[in-house]
Image: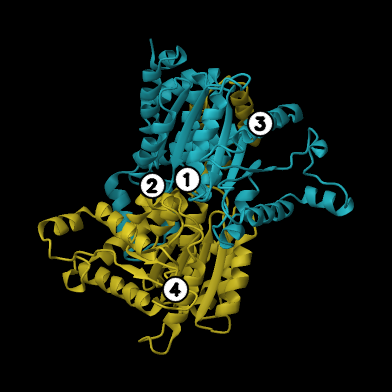
Chain colours: A cyan, B yellow
Amino acid sequence: MSLAESVLAGETLALARLLTRIENDTSEGRQALNELFPHTGKAHLVGITGAPGTGKSSLVNRIALQLRKPSETPPRRVAVLAVDPSSPFTGGAVLGDRVRMRDLSGDPGIFIRSMATRGSLGGLAQATAAMAQVFDAAGFDVVLIETVGAGQAEVDIARLAHTTLVVESPGLGDEIQAIKAGILEIADILVVNKADLPGVEKTERALRGMLELAHPVERVFLHHGQAMSVHAPEKENATLWVPPVQRTIATSGAGVAELVALIDKHAQHLHQSGEWGHRERTRLEVELELLIQGTLLERFRSGIPGERYDGMVDRLVRREISPGEAVDELMK
Amino acid sequence: MSLAESVLAGETLALARLLTRIENDTSEGRQALNELFPHTGKAHLVGITGAPGTGKSSLVNRIALQLRKPSETPPRRVAVLAVDPSSPFTGGAVLGDRVRMRDLSGDPGIFIRSMATRGSLGGLAQATAAMAQVFDAAGFDVVLIETVGAGQAEVDIARLAHTTLVVESPGLGDEIQAIKAGILEIADILVVNKADLPGVEKTERALRGMLELAHPVERVFLHHGQAMSVHAPEKENATLWVPPVQRTIATSGAGVAELVALIDKHAQHLHQSGEWGHRERTRLEVELELLIQGTLLERFRSGIPGERYDGMVDRLVRREISPGEAVDELMK
């Protein structure tokens, strides 16, 4: 049985082994991905991002546990993929795993995997996409992709998900609000975690204010009909999704059931509006682009002898040639 | 006079115009970069990174003001390049500019420029490198490259600097310390900003603890000679640089003169140890790599008709072909 076949048969060890192959970008891993791809397209990929200190990891644990509850109809198999772009070396990911194990271990319906940076630009997003595919093919219903930080890498990873949660928390200062202007625009659901901390109203207000800026359609609504609240459920039709703001307390679990209901509602909205297909296409375009990028660079490098490349860097250091000219010459 | 010649002649308007050409990646901008490159290699490139909420921007303003003081021997021309990878759209950068203008405007020896994300992966780091080159050629002595956030993009940008400052502040919770394990390894100088807040001792202690993990050499020192403090200035020889921890209060300016002295000391260390040349080489290698990556992707795209590419994405969506197989076919 091939590695891919073992994964399709539900063997957990094979799954873990394949994820490692993918992280190391081996040819066996690539082969298995090709085999598994026809079996993908069913899982709901949920990205969770936000600044450090917002309690994202605990929240992700809680979401996973909620999805496993017998009260959920149906309880779902959950994969957690924790991506740590801020840890280019070691440490963060390992630590994360240890904390998670304590909460989630023992349930065969939950699989946890963390990954630190792999190589250079794009490599991490590429590996994330590949791992999500494996979970999807292996029959996990929901894949929670958690990223640490709030930078470009996180935005790129968010583009790989169907539903993106942006997590905030009170008390991180005003600066953080301004910084998030961009990342808010990718949010499908906003979460104010640590909602038991003072300042939660202020944070929520700031988020709603920024939402109005980020979603001009909504602003028009608010301007033209004073009495209309676009946040009210009856205003959310199939084509317009206004990112809701949900308070949670990950330590106690408060608000998590409501959050999971919103995640499901967003999936439903995506299907009903036809947006699911659109996002699926965008996702796959991004994946293709990442893969092309990596492959081009690899082929280019293997075609140029090391000494020639080093010699070019020597000339750069001596300012005999500019980077642009060096690229032109190497491409000849 | 070409745009590059005007920049070399010190014309501020030409400088601003060229930076915009570079941000938009025009052929005129690329041509000017080739012309300017032989004039680069003099500026001290200082990267400043750290999580949102640490007061980085105010600190960068203070560093710039300090470098301009008549008491500095000599006062230096300073360029500030604020890179905001977390703002893929608009907003953050503009807001940042407005706040900065208030503090730093009116001094012709300071030039401020901010930049939000340009295009996809790698584009931002590439544009940052190019802009730093322009400032260098234009005769700025110090280029402060500030990044917002603490993700992979920031690490990549840090690799473009000679000296990297990682800014922390008290009270961001314990989580943040663990997350930073990776980013600490790229730090040449650690700053605990907002040092007037409670918890500053705890933050500093945590940083020193992590430094020991990140710099095993230092740990050996501490283990084998109990009485030796490797943080003492006399222990810092030309070949070993132990990242110092400096407290600052950006709002009052406390500790900033000391921080600038440490930045200068690090430059001196780099020159004396021969590390400057090594970093310069690494920097240029990274630049070359980024440029190659961008150029390869561009050429690849221009060689494939849009419909063919779209057709491939259609087949991906229908799961008829895997991303890996699609790349193989497109590369034929």
Name the residue furthest top.
A1
- Are the residues tagged 2 and 4 within 8 Å (C-beta)? no
How far apart are labels 3 and 2 at the CA level?
Answer: 32 Å
Are tags 1 and 4 found on a single chain? no
Question: Can the viewer see residue B37?
Answer: yes
Are tags 2 and 1 found on a single chain? yes
Locate residue A301 relative to residue A139 in the image: left or right.
left
Secondary structure beneath label 3: helix
Amino acid, disc 2: Ser
Q: Chain of mark 2?
A: A
Considering only vertical position in the picture, is B254 above or below B114?
below
Considering only vertical position in the picture, is B300 above or below B41?
above
List the residue tagged with mark 4.
B249
- Are the residues tagged 3 and 4 within 8 Å (C-beta)? no
- Are the residues tagged 2 and 1 within 8 Å (C-beta)? yes
Q: Residue A87: give its label.
A: 2
Amino acid, disc 1: Val
- Are the residues tagged 1 and 4 within 8 Å (C-beta)? no
Considering only vertical position in the picture, is B273 above or below A193?
below
Q: How many marks?
A: 4
List the residue tagged with mark 3.
A261
How far apart are labels 3 and 1 at the CA level?
Answer: 24 Å
How far apart are labels 2 and 1 at the CA level?
Answer: 9 Å
Q: Chain of mark 1?
A: A
List the residue tagged with mark 1.
A148
Are tags 3 and 1 found on a single chain? yes
Q: Nearer the viewer, residue B153 or A329?
A: B153
Q: Residue B315: give its label.
A: none
Q: Which residue appears at 37% of the width and 76% of the height?
A: B260
